[in-house]
Amino acid sequence: MKSALKIYRSLPRHDSHSPSAVSIGNFDGVHRGHQTILARVAHVAQERDLTPTVMTFYPHPRVYFARTGNRPELMPTQISSLRDKVWGIQRLHIRQLALMRFNQKLAELSAEDFIRYTLVDGLNTRWLLVGEDFRFGRKRTGDLDMLRKAGREYGFEVDIITDVVDEHGHRISSSEVRTALAVGNLARAEHLLGHPYRISGHVVHGKKLGRTLGYPTLNVNVPQLCAARSGIYIVRAHGLAEQPLNGVASLGVRPTVDNNGRVLLEVHLLDCRVDAYGKLTRIEFLKFLRDEETFPDLPTMTAAIDNDAQRARDYFALHGL
């Protein structure tokens, strides 16, 4: 049984002074590289009787600086929602998550104050694992030398992790996952993530158009900067029944029927109906079928959906899922 994850949205912790083994990062996607890092945190924590801990930020610091600098083109796309990131971290035996809102106050914190506020007073850090290019504090003035010096002063050890590579020697990183998802290469994304790409969310009410076309859908909101390519996918829905449910899904802005530009995930379950409104589901992406299209009319769109659904049925028949 996994230990419960305690989430702290401000530091110092209100209910603990226990010493911690800590890693700091964005952990978008919680991919195989992150999994290696967090397994090491959990191992060292167990060896030294420390609490395995992650510090992460929302929004991504690059998103914050792109917004404040009015440079939206610099915003990185998002592999996982905050919910999925927390879920992925919890699965790896991490027991504390410092979920820090990246705002002006944090952006302007000096490197020295960052160490004191978050690592020393905040988490009672005894062991810290960071990447070799880790920078922190106002204008990224903090570096590894500063961390090591502070460690000697405050009593924590600094360890460095280099790039994690796969069995072919290729680097595993969030940017690699984003690239794979952007072109619809789900096999590559699965290789990097260690599992099929997935998005979780509560089923929300849509415009009910699919129902009138004979294709009722479950509607799930996704991050606005979703890294996955817009288009039609073969999927499975978890959490709505005892077994995963086969489906076909549209991820995108619905250009034929809507013009508000909001990205939505619409899932049509094949040959079954479930009462899913308000329920939390995890949609697993199995195969990219085609790009999102604008159709001249609804009959043409319906014919395309008919074809998508048949291709999905053929896929599940072939793969025995």
Image (cartoon, rainbow, N blue to C red):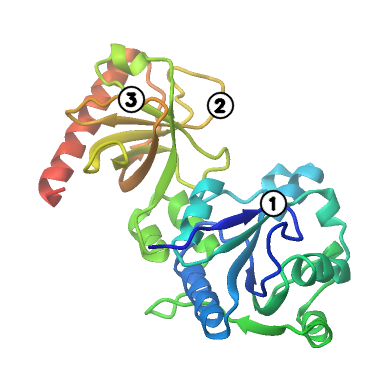
Q: Label 1 to label 3, Cα distance in Å? A: 35 Å
For the point 46% across and 46% down, the residue is 228
Q: Position of residue 86 (x, y in %)?
A: 53, 54
Image height of 132 relative to 293, above or below: below
Q: Position of residue 256 (x, y in %)?
A: 43, 19
Q: Position of residue 82 (x, y in %)?
A: 56, 48
Q: Which residue is mark 1?
A: 9
For the residue labelled by badge 3, is the local secondary structure a helix, a strand or a loop? loop
For the point 11% across and 44% down, the residue is 317
Mark closest to the chain's N terminus, 1 or 3: 1
Q: Residues within 10 Å of mark 3 (few under 14, many from 20)?
A: many
Q: Mark on residue 298?
A: none
Q: Label 2 to label 1, Cα distance in Å? A: 31 Å
Image height of 167 relative to 104, above or below: below
For the point 24% across and 16% down, the residue is 214
Q: Which residue is mark 2?
A: 261
Mark closest to the chain's N terminus, 3 or 2: 3
* Amino acid at the residue labelled 2: Gly
Q: Position of residue 251 (x, y in %)?
A: 42, 35
Mark closest to the chain's N terminus, 2 or 1: 1
Q: Mark on residue 217?
A: 3
For the residue labelled by badge 1, is the local secondary structure a helix, a strand or a loop? loop
* Amino acid at the residue labelled 1: Arg
Image quadrant in which the N terminus is located: bottom left
* Location of residue 204 (image quadrant): top left
**Looking at the image, which is closer to me, 233 or 123?**
123
**Looking at the image, which is closer to me, 91 or 60?**
91
Locate residue 99 relative to residue 5 in the image: left or right. right
Q: Label 3 to label 2, Cα distance in Å? A: 19 Å
For the point 14% across and 51% down, the residue is 319
- Circle 3 or circle 2, nearest the eye: 3
Asked whether residue 117 is in view, the answer is yes
